[in-house]
Amino acid sequence: MNLQCRFDLGSKYKAGPQIARVVSEDWCARELYCPACDSDRLNGSKPNNPAVDFECAKCAQPFQLKGLRNWNPRKVVDAGYEAMLRAIRADNTPNLLLLQYSSTWLVKNLLLIPRMFFSESIIEKRNPLGPNARRAGWVGCNILLGEIPPDGRIRMISDGVPVRKEEVREGFSRVKRLAELPPSFRGWTLDVLRTIRRLDRRGFSLQEVYEFESELKALHPRNENVRPKIRQQLQVLRDLGIIKFSGKGHYVFPN
């Protein structure tokens, strides 16, 4: 994989974001493969779909690209807040590719967020634009990368070193069945997965997950039966193969 972008492609543009878009999209078209199947290339999307930059001709997975020089592992600025919520509720969010480049236009990091990891819990509402702004009153959002479970943050390039294709595709394959859940249900599943990942060990108990009861209640205030919901979601994660039951009230993540 050649990590050098063709920065000369941006010479006819003046705006920084436009230059980053043209250069990073060209790199992806030349060098990127599909992480969801065995296709070794992605195609540019149709012009009438502004939220999607690339599609896989083999498996039809959609991808949105964000190219940036400054890397913030906690959050990334996105588009309109209400539009993002509508996309999540309609299950229309594409897979997100976050590409960081250096001052010499070398790709330093490439992070994949599979589309099934987008839930309302990771979307942060920004303050409205001021009265003097061109789009006064418009409300944008941030994607809280730090609130996404590590299962949903798949590195394709890390500190200038490409990750093996097999490893990337295995990571996507482990979580792809989350897409089988409807968005209204999946949010709970992702929130429970995020909490048990915060325990930072392979094995855990039901009682340890119960310690996050108040936090989960705050995320889902309409639910009055949080503990039964936790048990339900652990079973869902087990059925999806993301965790395994290891004994009475105990679970493990597979190797």
Image: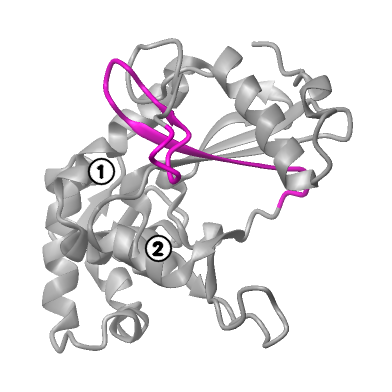
Which numbered disc flags the more N-terminal residue, 1 or 2?
Answer: 2
Secondary structure beneath dot 2 equals helix
Quarter of the C terminus within the rendering: top left
Instruction: Give the mark toward the camera: 1 or 2.
Output: 2
From this view, report whether residue 95 is shown above or below residue 199.
Answer: above
From this view, report whether residue 255 is shown above or below residue 218.
Answer: above
Picture coordinates of residue 112 (x, y %)? 49, 38
Residue at 26% in and 36% down: 176
* Residue designated by label 1: 242
From this view, report whether residue 80 is shown above or below residue 254.
Answer: below
Picture coordinates of residue 54 (x, y %)? 45, 29
Residue type at numbered disc 2: Met
* Residue designated by label 2: 84
Asked if disc 1 and disc 2 are in contact, CB closer than 8 Å, the reply is: no
Residue at 70% in and 78% down: 133
Residue 221, located in which quarter of the rendered image?
bottom left
Residue type at numbered disc 1: Ile
* Most common secondary structure along the magenta stretch: loop
- Can residue 17 be seen in this snapshot? yes
The front one of 206 and 39 is: 39
Range of the magenta residues? 47-71
From this view, report whether residue 116 is shown above or below residue 248.
Answer: above
Left or right: 124 as drawn, with respect to 84: right
Magenta region includes residue 132: no
Residue at 57% in and 77% down: 126
Secondary structure beneath dot 1 equals loop
Residue at 57% in and 83% down: 137
Q: Dot 2: within a 10 Å radius of its alpha carbon, few (fewer than 14), some, or many (20 or more) residues? A: many
Magenta region includes residue 61: yes
Picture coordinates of residue 144 (x, y %)? 53, 63
